Structures are given as structure tokens and as C-alpha cells.
Amino acid sequence: MTGNAATVLAGPPAATAVIAAAARQAATLERPPHLVIVRVGDDPASVSYVRGKAKKAGESGLRSTVHALPETTPSADLLALVASLNADPDVHGILVQLPLPPHIAEEPVLAAIDPDKDVDGLHPMNIGRLWSGRPTLAPCTPAGVMALLEHYGVPVAGRRAVIVGRSQLVGRPLAGLLLAADATVTVAHSRTRDLGAVTREADILVAAVGRAHLITPDMVKPAAVVIDVGINRVVGDDGKAHLTGDVHPDVAAVASALTPVPGGVGPMTVAQLMANTVQAARRQQSQTSGVTGDLVR
Ligand code: NAD
């Protein structure tokens, strides 16, 4: 391994700045923004994510309520709960924690959420707004990546951005956000031929795949900024499980800047949820700002 050259783009300071800005805005509202999180079943990762989000809401000056429904909840009951939250003027943001149990189809549930309360940004209306370059509630992880780039002053306009991964949750919406920020965007995926030739074009390379150390130093253009969204649980030489990203650690010798895993994009995702909830509450309480606006050409 060669020496580390890349600047570490740590998530926590950037996340703290995003949350501080959201808390300042929240404090100007008549009523504190209220985030409602709905969880179905007891998937341990979901339980832990929901707990973390509710805790962070409290620290950010937001109210939060968690509805924990049993694994066997019928689809109709979940849809009825979403409808009642949509109709409740005291609720500003609604998040249904994914994945849902196999007997509940995700798409109808996501489409049932009022787009103005859709703080996860997964409603088709908000996806359409994002892709047409209009202000929107954007999905939290890609919006968090954009906030991280902004926090560290990484220029985006006019630069070549390559995203590896085309999921609805990360890769696709991030492509829309980078495009709106005037990057020249390429999305690579599992069927991409000669992935290295594509990734070596990138000034900003984002890995959102879920394969430990897929991105190796030879796949990175010297001085590129590399954003590692991947979270992979691997067993180390010590026999213990630990988290690692999609980017091989040796990439630090080639890149100019690199996000760590853990402690990079992860904290930004939760911070952005708070920012989205405040944005949704501002729009609902003032009707002056929010998800309408001019087209970006
Ligand atoms: P996904 O499984 O939905 O999508 C993975 C994508 O990677 C697919 O589009 C697929 O085409 C592509 N892919 C698979 N193998 C590939 C290969 N060999 N070469 C190129 N592309 C390949 O996953 P996701 O939900 O987008 O999540 C991706 C990763 O990001 C996971 O590790 C996940 O845990 C992590 N994640 C992190 C956060 C966070 O807050 N940090 C949030 C969401 C997801």
C-alpha cells in the first residue's frame, strides 16, 4: 500500500452544519416540525435506524413520533394509517421505514404518502420534480451527498461525475441532483462493460453498489473526489464483523479526497432527513417556500 494522500471528507462536521441550519429554520416556525416514522415488523437494522432518526430529531428541535406496527399488519391497515397522517395538520413529515415485510408492496404505500409530507422523497411526484429540475423533497442519501460536497467546497458545475449504482434510493436520484448542479453525469451499473474505463473519466466518483472494495486504485483518475456510499458488513482478519465501503482503502493514495465508511455519507443521510422535515413544515406552515419553483435548464 502507498501513503495516504486524500483529504478525509468526514460526515459528522458536515452533518452538524446541516442540522444546525435546519434547527435555526425550525426555531422560526410557529410550531416545531413534526416527523412521524412508521415501522412495520422488528427487523433489527430497521429498529436501529428508526431509533437513530427519532433521537436525532429530538436533538434538532423537531418533534417525532414512531408508530411500530406488528410484522403481520395488513397492507390496508398501513394505508389507512398513512391516510390519517396525511390528513393530520399536526404532522409535517411522514417516513415509512423500508424494507416492508414481503406481504406489503412498497410502491402503493410510497405513492399513498402526501408528496408535500414525503420527507424520504420517494413519491413518484417528487421523483418527477427532481428529474425536471424543480425544487423537491429529494431522497435523503443523495441529498446528503450533495450537502457533503457543498460543505467541503467541492466544485460540481461542469465536472464529470460518475455514479456506480442505479438504485431508486441512491444512484438514480443522485444523477438528477448532480445534473441539476450542472455536472456532466454518467451512471454505471451491473451491466456496464469495462467499468474501470468509465470510472477513470470521473472528477467526482460515487460508489453506491454494496460490494466491499469494488473500486480499486486503478479505477480512479488521479486527484478525483471519491464518495463512498456503500455499507458492507465484512469479517476482518481478527474474525470480527466490521463495516467497510465499496471503495478500496488504497484509493486514498490516488484520490484527492475520500469519504470514510463508517462516518462519511451515513451521518449525512440522517441530517438530510431533518432538513427535509423542516423544509416540509415550512411549506405547510407558511405556504411560501418549498417544493414549487422554476425549472432548471
Ligand atoms: P441496490 O442493491 O438497490 O443497488 C445496487 C446497484 O449497484 C444496482 O443499481 C446495480 O446495478 C449496481 N451494481 C451491482 N453490482 C455491480 C457491479 N459489479 N458493478 C457495477 N454496478 C453494480 O443498493 P442501494 O440501496 O443503492 O445501496 C447501495 C449501497 O449503499 C449499499 O451498500 C447500501 O447499504 C448503501 N447505502 C448507504 C446509505 C447511507 O446512508 N450511507 C444509504 C443507502 C444505501
Image (spheres, rainbow, N blue to C red):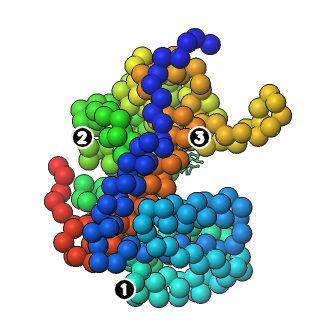
C-alpha separation, residue under disc 1 versus residue under disc 2: 37 Å
Q: Is residue 209 left or right of residue 83?
A: right
In the picture provided, is 153 more to the left or to the right than 162? left
In the image, 287 versus 82, the foreground residue is 287
Numbered badge on residue 262:
3
Q: Which residue is rendered at x = 46% and y = 84% of the image?
A: 85
Q: Earlier in the sequence, mark 1 or mark 2?
A: 1
Q: Position of residue 64 (x, y in %)?
A: 50, 73
Please, what secondary structure does the residue beneath circle 1 have?
A: loop
Residue 198 seen from this side: no
Q: Residue at x 46, y 73 (%)?
A: 63
What residue does disc 1 label? 89
- Which quadrant of the figure has residue 234? top right
Which is nearer the eye, 268 or 193?
Answer: 268
Task: Name the side, left or right, on which 43 lies relative to 2.
Answer: right
- Whether residue 152 is situated above or below residue 286 in the rendered picture: above
Camera-nearest label, 1 or 2: 1
Q: Secondary structure at mark 2?
A: loop
- Label at residue 107: none
Coordinates of residue 109 in the picture (x, y in percent): 51, 75
Q: CA distance from mark 2 to mark 3?
A: 29 Å
Answer few, some or many: residues within 10 Å of disc 2's Cα (few below 14, many 20 plus, some between 14 and 19): some
Q: Quadrant of ligand 1?
A: top right
> In terms of sequence position, does the residue under pointer 3 or pointer 1 come before the other?
1
* Residue 228 on image: x %, y %: 51, 37
Seen in the picture, residue 40 relative to 269 is either above or below; the reply is: below
Q: Report which residue position mark 2 lands on.
A: 182
Q: Amino acid at mark 2?
A: Asp
Reading the chain from its start, which is encountered first: label 2 or label 3? 2
